[in-house]
C-alpha cells in the first residue's frame, strides 16, 4: 500500500515540473522524463512528425517552464530581481542576459537558466563563444580566479545546450519526409551524445548532427575540467559539485554523481537543486521511494524560498 501511495504521490508531484525540463536539457534525464527504461523512445508509433517536432521546439519547452506556479513564499534573490528588471527593460542586452543566466544557475530558479542560454544564442550565436574566450584569458592571467572558471563552465554548458538544440532541429528536419520515426531514433541520438560510439554515429546517418554532438561532448568536457579545477582549489563549492555531478551522470558514472551530490548535501542540505539531482539518481537506479522522498524535500525547500 505504501508503495502505491508513493507512486500516486510521484505522479501528482512531478508533472509538470520546470526543473525537470532543465535537467532534460543538461542530458541528465532520459526522455520521456519518467520512463522506466532508457530504451523507450517518444511517440515511436506516431505516423506523423508534426506533434513530436512541436514538443521538442524551444518555445514549447519555455512554455512548459511556466506550468508550475512559483510558491507565494518563494523569495527571489535581489540580484536576480535587478537583472530581470534590466532584461525586461532591454531584452536584447546580451551582457545582462548572460549575467542573469549566471545568477539563475546558482539558485533554486535553475530551470530558468536554460531558456536564457537559448535566447542568447538566438540574439547572437557568437556571444557565448566571446564569453568563453574572455574567461579563458582571465583564467590564463590568474588560474585562481574561480569566478572566471565558473563563468567559463556555464558558458560551456550554454554552448552545449545551444548546439544540442540545433542538432536536434537538424535531425528532426531530416526525418520530416518519413512516414514514421526510425526505430529507437532518440536512443541513438542520446547514446552517441553520451558515448561517442561510432556505431551510434553510423546509426544517426547524419554527418552534420554527428559534428554538432561532437562539439556538445567537447564543451561538456571543457566544463568538467573547469569544475574540477574549482573544486581542487575550494572543495566547498556546492554548485561546482552539483554541475560536476550532472556531467558525471551524463557520462554514465552514477556512483561518482551520487558521491558528489551527497557531498553537496553535506555542505548544504537546504539546497533544493541538490535534492532534485539526488532524486533523479535514485530514479535512474529504480529506487522509487527514495526518489519520491527527495522530490518532496526539493519541492518543500523551493516553496520555502530556499
Image (cartoon, rainbow, N blue to C red):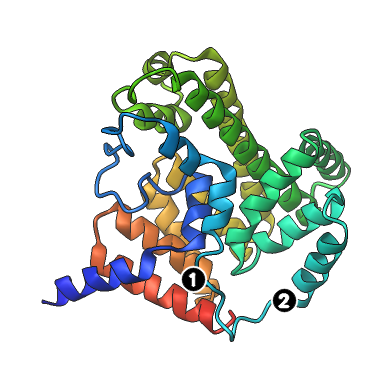
Question: Residue 2: which quarter of the image?
Answer: bottom left
Image side of residue 19 versus residue 153, left or right: left
In the image, is residue 241 above or below residue 118? below
| Drawn side of residue 239 relative to residue 31, left or right | right
Residue 228, image x, y percentages: 61, 48
CA separation, marks 1 and 2?
A: 21 Å
Depth-wise, is mark 1 or mark 2 nearer the camera? 2
Q: Which residue is mark 2?
A: 77
Kindly identify the residue that appears in the image at 72 percent across and 76 percent down: 77
The circle on residue 178 is: none
Does dot 1 land on a helix, a strand or a loop?
helix
- Secondary structure at badge 2 equals loop
Q: Where the C terminus falls, by quadrant?
A: bottom right
Q: Position of residue 136 (x, y in %)?
A: 81, 39
The crowd level at tag 1 (other Cα within 10 Å; few <14, some 14-19, many 20+) is many
Q: Is residue 217 left or right of residue 288?
A: right
The residue tagged 1 is: 265
Residue in the image at 78% along x and 66% along y: 84
Q: Is 140 on the left or on the right of 65, as rendered?
A: right
Between 224 and 75, the one nearer to me in the picture = 75
Q: Quadrant of the N terminus?
A: bottom left
**Badge 1 vs badge 2, beta-carbon distance below 8 Å:** no
Seen at 58% across and 19% down, the residue is 211
The residue sitting at 44% across, 39% down in the picture is 251
Amino acid at each position: 500500500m505504501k508503495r502505491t501511495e508513493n507512486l500516486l504521490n510521484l505522479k501528482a508531484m512531478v508533472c509538470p515540473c520546470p526543473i525537470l525540463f532543465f535537467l532534460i536539457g543538461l542530458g541528465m534525464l532520459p526522455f520521456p522524463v519518467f520512463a522506466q527504461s532508457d530504451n523507450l523512445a517518444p511517440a515511436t508509433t506516431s505516423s506523423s512528425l508534426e506533434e513530436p517536432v512541436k514538443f521538442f521546439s524551444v518555445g514549447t519547452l519555455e512554455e512548459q517552464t511556466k506550468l508550475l506556479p512559483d510558491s507565494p513564499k518563494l523569495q527571489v534573490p535581489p540580484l536576480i530581481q535587478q537583472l530581470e528588471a534590466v532584461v525586461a527593460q532591454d531584452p536584447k542586452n546580451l551582457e545582462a542576459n548572460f549575467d542573469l543566466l549566471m545568477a539563475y544557475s546558482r539558485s533554486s530558479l535553475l530551470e530558468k537558466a536554460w531558456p536564457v542560454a537559448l535566447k542568447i544564442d538566438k540574439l547572437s550565436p557568437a556571444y557565448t563563444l566571446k564569453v568563453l574566450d574572455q574567461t579563458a584569458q582571465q583564467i590564463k592571467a590568474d588560474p585562481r580566479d574561480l569566478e572566471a572558471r565558473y563563468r567559463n563552465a556555464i558558458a560551456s554548458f550554454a554552448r552545449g545546450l545551444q548546439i544540442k538544440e540545433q542538432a536536434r532541429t537538424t535531425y528532426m528536419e531530416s526525418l520530416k519526409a518519413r512516414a514514421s520515426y526510425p526505430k529507437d531514433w532518440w536512443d541513438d541520438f542520446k547514446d552517441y551524445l553520451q558515448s561517442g560510439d561510432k556505431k551510434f554515429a553510423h546509426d544517426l546517418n547524419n554527418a552534420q548532427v554527428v559534428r554538432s554532438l561532437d562539439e556538445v561532448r567537447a564543451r561538456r568536457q571543457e566544463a568538467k575540467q573547469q569544475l574540477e579545477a574549482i573544486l581542487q582549489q575550494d572543495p566547498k563549492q556546492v554548485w561546482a559539485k552539483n554541475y560536476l555531478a550532472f556531467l558525471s551522470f551524463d557520462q554514465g558514472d552514477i556512483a561518482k554523481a551520487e558521491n558528489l551530490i551527497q557531498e553537496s548535501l553535506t555542505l548544504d542540505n537546504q539546497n533544493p537543486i541538490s535534492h532534485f539531482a539526488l532524486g533523479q539518481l535514485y530514479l535512474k537506479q529504480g529506487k522509487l521511494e527514495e526518489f519520491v522522498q527527495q522530490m518532496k524535500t526539493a519541492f518543500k525547500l523551493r516553496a520555502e524560498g530556499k
